[in-house]
Image (cartoon, rainbow, N blue to C red):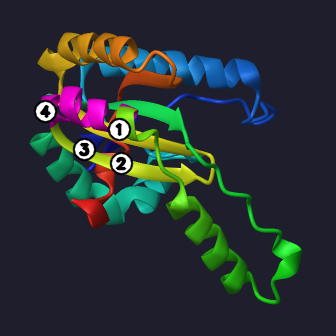
């Protein structure tokens, strides 16, 4: 769908098709993989449904300038992620222990931020993967896992995979998943640029 001077990747879905249908989600994942082979794109997390090009433009108009800037700046970049379990996962707070939703969310945030990756794995990842990246971030996704997200030039993907193999050899007892390439998602967030 053409919106301004950008394009949205779209898939026609019948009105009676459940949006959470497994086959539909697999089809979307396959389309994303093909797109990523051809070009860098900004992932609109979880996508959205539109009825027309005008509807798409209305939903995206506020983001077009930022997306265009990101696509130009990161034309040859993709994201790679290294996910690992937290070394000392914290217990998730029980929402019934709080009188306000805000207090519960603050406690949940504190527990999430307290999680950390195995220090040997983190140091090795900082030594092996981070130098390959244009930008990187360690993120606390929840109270049980930590993730390194690295923005890497497409031409360095084989180097990143080799770094993952070295990481596995150096940290054989620490489970992790190195995956990608992924579209711009974490680095599409202007608040962190």
- Mark 2 surroundings: few (<14), some (14-19) or many (≥20) residues within 10 A: some
The disc label shown at residue 122, or none: 1
Q: Mark 3 — residue?
A: 136
Callout in the foreground (4, 3): 4
Q: Is residue 43 visible?
A: no
Query: Is residue 172 toward the left or the right of residue 143 in the image?
Result: left
Is 40 part of what is drawn in magenta? no
Q: Mark 4 — residue?
A: 131
Query: Is residue 17 toward the left or the right of residue 176 in the image?
Result: right
Q: Residue furthest right?
A: 96
Callout in the foreground (1, 3): 1
Q: Which corner quadrant of the image does residue 36 belong to?
A: top left
Q: Which corner quadrant of the image does residue 20 belong to?
A: top right
- Labelled pair 3, 2 in contact (Cβ < 8 Å): yes
Q: Which residues are magenta?
A: 121-133
Query: Is residue 30 toward the left or the right of residue 61 in the image?
Result: right
Q: Is residue 171 visible?
A: yes
Q: Mark 2 — residue?
A: 138
Q: Residue furthest bottom?
A: 99
For the residue pair 73 and 84, the one nearer the viewer reads as 84
Image spot of residue 125 (x, y percent): 29, 31
What residue is rendered at 81% in x and 33% in y? 16
What residue is rendered at 34% in x and 66% in y? 62
- Labelled pair 4, 2 in contact (Cβ < 8 Å): no
Above or below: residue 120 compared with residue 88: above
- Secondary element under disc 1, as helix, strand or loop, is helix
- Labelled pair 1, 2 in contact (Cβ < 8 Å): yes
- Secondary element under disc 4, as helix, strand or loop, is helix
Which one is earlier in the sequence, the residue at label 1 or at label 3?
1
């Amino acid at each position: 769908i053409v919106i301004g001077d950008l394009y949205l990747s779209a898939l026609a879905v019948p009105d009676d098709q459940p949006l959470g249908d497994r086959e539909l989600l697999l089809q979307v994942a396959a389309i994303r993989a093909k797109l990523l082979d051809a070009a860098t794109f900004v992932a609109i997390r979880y996508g959205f449904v539109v009825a027309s090009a005008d509807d798409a433009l209305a939903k995206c108009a506020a983001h077009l300038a930022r997306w265009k800037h990101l696509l130009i700046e990161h034309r040859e970049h993709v994201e790679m992620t290294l996910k690992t379990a937290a070394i000392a996962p914290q217990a998730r707070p029980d929402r019934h222990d709080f009188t306000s939703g805000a207090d519960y969310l603050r406690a949940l945030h504190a527990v999430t931020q307290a999680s950390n990756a195995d220090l040997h794995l983190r140091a090795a990842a900082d030594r092996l993967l981070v130098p390959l990246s244009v930008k990187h971030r360690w993120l606390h996704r929840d109270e049980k896992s930590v993730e390194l997200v690295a923005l890497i030039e497409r031409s360095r993907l084989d180097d990143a995979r080799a770094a993952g193999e070295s990481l596995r050899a150096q940290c054989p007892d620490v489970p992790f998943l190195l995956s990608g390439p992924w579209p711009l998602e974490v680095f599409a967030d202007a608040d962190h640029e």
